Amino acid sequence: MSKCSLIGRRAAVLRVMFLTAIITLLVPGQPALAGQAGWDALKNGTAFVIMRHALAPGTGDPGNFNVDECSTQRNLSDQGRQQARKTGDLFRSNGIADAEVWSSAWCRCRDTAQLLGLGTMQTLEPLNSFFRRQGRRDAQTTALKNWLQARTGEKPLVLVTHQVNISALTGVFPQSGELIFVQMGADNSLRVIDRTGIAAQ
């Protein structure tokens, strides 16, 4: 084999490896069952969960979107509502029946948070979607990190938000309803330690 042919073949292999890596990062796969370490870290306060809202078919929101009017938004389907309830059962089966729950102001996130049944839901502005306003990505992600760093609550922390927010914060592209277990360092660094979820049926 000539030197040029060998170089070409190596270049082709590298291209395939690069594209495979990109697809792995960007295409959501079936979440694995979280290990006990993830749940233990959530219970002892060394990790928090950030969750993508349950199944709400479609992308983005209608043109007449109003954050204060659920009828103008993309909302949970019946399968999504069932998925959220089962996810709450998953928390309880792992020893978490009471949590500090924060949500985006979007109805599909608020409904997911309430259907978990883990405690009173509160809204948090940095969890709001910036899907239509990508220029807010860095500012909102920084604001969320600062909020996490300053938080003093003692209950397990559950955040319900959108794919774009989770991807910006963690680098993970989550499925609808997926739970991402995250540890945060003193320097605001983040480390995903586990992920799981209940598939919508």
Image: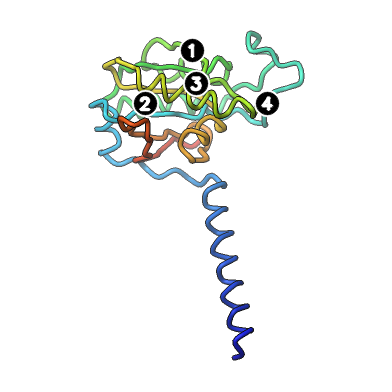
How far apart marks 4 and 1 lie (CA) works out to 19 Å
Q: Marks 3 and 4: which is nearer the front?
A: 4
Q: Mark 1 points at which residue?
A: 123
Q: Nearer the viewer, residue 146 or 13?
A: 146
Q: Which of marks 4 and 1 is in front?
A: 4
Q: Which residue position holds label 4?
A: 132
Compared with 59, 111 (above or below) is: above
Location of residue 127 with respect to 18 vertically, above or below: above
**In the image, is 85 to the left or to the right of 28?**
left
Mark 1 is on which residue type? Answer: Thr
Vertically, is 122 above or below 162? Answer: above
Residue at point 66%, 9% (across, down):
69
Left or right for 137, reference 193: right
Which residue position holds label 3? 112
Between disc 3 and disc 1, the foreground one is 1
Q: Which residue: 43% across, 29% down? A: 50
- Secondary structure, mark 2, is helix
Residue shown at 67%/28% (left/top)? 60
Between the C-alphas of marks 3 and 1, the distance is 12 Å
SS under mark 1: strand
* Sequence-wise first label, 3 or 4: 3
Q: On the picture, is 35 further left or further right than 17?
A: left
Name the kind of residue labelled 3 in the image.
Thr
Determine whether 28 is above or below 93 in the image.
Answer: below
Give the amino acid at mark 2.
Answer: Asp
Instruction: Tell whether 151 sits left or right of 141.
Output: left
- List the residue tagged with mark 2: 89
Question: Reading the chain from its start, which is encountered first: label 2 or label 3?
Answer: 2
